[in-house]
Amino acid sequence: MDQRAELSEFLRSRRARLKPEDVGLPDFGRRRRVPGLRREELAQLAGVSVAYYTRLEQGHGQNVSIEVLDSIARALRLSDTERDHLTHLAKPNPKKKRRAVRAAQKLRPQLQMLIDAMDGVPAFFVGRRMDILGWNRMACALLGDLAALPPQERNMARLVFLDPGARDLYLDWEGKALEVVSVLRLCAGCYPDDPQLSALVGELSVKSDEFRTLWAAHTVQEKGHGTKRLRHRLVGEMTLLYETLRLPDDPDVALVTYHAEPGSASEESLGLLAKWGVDEVPAPAIR
């Protein structure tokens, strides 16, 4: 991916979402040719010259200091995740990134043993590009028989956008799709030279209009914790809580788990799903 273009488009998209009144600037009612703040307004808020900010927004961020990036992040009202993303785009570490991309991600056998022992809890590991690196029996019962997929198709973004069953499973499919794209966009900022990631983004952009639209918005976020409402074809609707736990020695790998509130109808449904197992659940229908 073109690092300069990514930096430029990200800054433009963040500037476009702000209005003068959002940042305490007067709006004299003059018609704006483009949405959001003007470059000179953003430069004023960040305490830099218009020429300096313009060069940065054109993708020339090689010599920018962390202090200036912090000032621009505050002016743009960036979240902590967006601020980190801006830093990755403006000041990448090429040697570190190239080493990381070349190294194939493998799951330690002990980690697979861990999730296999989590009886009744759907659990799986995701890596860079949202590849699914390992899963337990309950994850397959919930999401579909992952083992039946070819290794290159075991990817959460591919499942959400290319498997028709995902739209039935996630009651808020639009929210899930935005989450997936936002996490994938964050990964792209950290690993812009990853050819497999570029190929994945290209494939999804060609095959899914929704993905292409969401990708162009440059939204970034970490996958954290929350609630998902699901409609499973065997047990019906469930409200499940999810947690995302990154490995201390490999932050590019995260454990994702689902569980239900104790005593809830969703806990009962999850228990029924555990009894029926994977044999009743088809493999995802990736196109």
Image: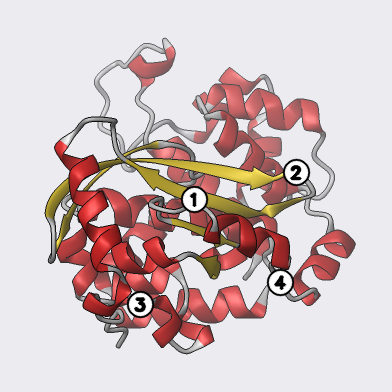
Give the mark, 4 or 1, whose residue is nearer the N terminus. Answer: 4
Q: Name the side, left or right, on which 155 lies relative to 261.
A: right
- Residue ID for mark 2: 248
The answer to whether mark 4 and mark 1 are in CB contact below 8 A is: no
The answer to whether mark 2 and mark 3 are in CB contact below 8 A is: no
Give the mark, 2 or 3, whose residue is nearer the N terminus. Answer: 3
- Distance from label 3 to label 1 (Cα)? 17 Å
User: Which image quadrant is residue 277 in?
Assistant: bottom left
- Is residue 131 something that shows in the picture? no
Give the mark, 4 or 2, whose residue is nearer the N terminus. Answer: 4
- Distance from label 1 to label 2 (Cα)? 15 Å
Give the residue type at disc 3: Asp
- Residue ID for mark 3: 145
Location of the C terminus (image quadrant): bottom left
Q: Mark 4 packing: few (<14 Cα in 10 Å), some, or many (20+)?
A: few
- Distance from label 4 to label 3 (Cα)? 20 Å
